[in-house]
Amino acid sequence: KLRLVLVDVSNQEAQLSVKHVQTQIFPCRTPMDLSIGAALWFAARGEGRLFGGNTESSGETYNVQSRILFSGLGADELLAGYKGRHRSVFKRGGMTALLAELDADLSRLWWRNLGRDDRLISCHGREVRHPFLDEDLIRGCCR
């Protein structure tokens, strides 16, 4: 059964986690890596409020029991989801340039993001799944 857990972290709690997250994202060091890393780290921790299916969540704290976390990594790179950048590339060089940019984006994921994300998620004894990086899906989208 899938459950959506809303994770809300105070600024103080976020600040207290910075050094630990920086250790886990190394050698990545950009503010974007820290931001993504903190979000993944807190999501993987699995503490939050269970979303009840309407616009409100239940107020009670929920601790995730699952060892699996699904990630959307690859969706933007595969489906041209970085609107501003991908739109600019298309306007400058057309479809050929956009396809080359998407190929470069996908190629970088393997060495740039996967190790960082795996370290952050495994800190909490969880494993990550990347449905948008499924080889059959990538082949189908790249036809």
Image (cartoon, helix red, strand yellow):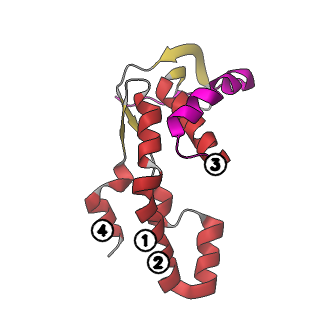
Q: Check disc 1 and report the residue beneath it.
A: 103
Q: Is residue 74 above or below residue 51?
A: below
Q: Is residue 10 magenta?
A: yes
Q: Check disc 2 and report the residue beneath it.
A: 100
The residue stretch that appears in magenta: 1-29
Q: Is residue 107 above or below residue 123?
A: below
Residue shown at 43% from the left, 71% from the top: 103
Residue shown at 35% from the left, 55% from the top: 133
* Residue 21 spot, x, y in % from top left: 57, 32
Kind of residue at disc 1: Asp
Q: Could you tell me how far apart the alpha carbons at marks 3 and 4 are, in whole angstroms?
A: 33 Å
Upstream in sequence: badge 1 or badge 4: 1
* Residue 55 seen by the camera: yes
- Number of numbered discs: 4
Density class for disc 2 (Cα within 10 Å; few <14, some 14-19, many ≥20) is few
Q: Is residue 125 magenta?
A: no
Q: Secondary structure at mark 3?
A: loop
Q: Check disc 3 and report the residue beneath it.
A: 30
Kind of residue at disc 3: Thr
**Which tag is nearer the camera, tag 1 or tag 4?**
1
Q: Could you tell me how far apart the alpha carbons at marks 3 and 1 are, in whole angstroms?
A: 22 Å
Q: Could you tell me how far apart the alpha carbons at marks 2 and 1 are, in whole angstroms?
A: 5 Å
Quadrant showing the C terminus: bottom left
**Which tag is nearer the camera, tag 3 or tag 1?**
3
* Residue 36 spot, x, y in % from top left: 58, 42
Q: Secondary structure at mark 2?
A: helix
Q: Tags 2 and 1 in contact by the CB under 8 Å rule?
A: yes
Residue shown at 62% from the left, 25% from the top: 17
Q: Check disc 4 and report the residue beneath it.
A: 140
Q: Secondary structure at mark 4?
A: helix
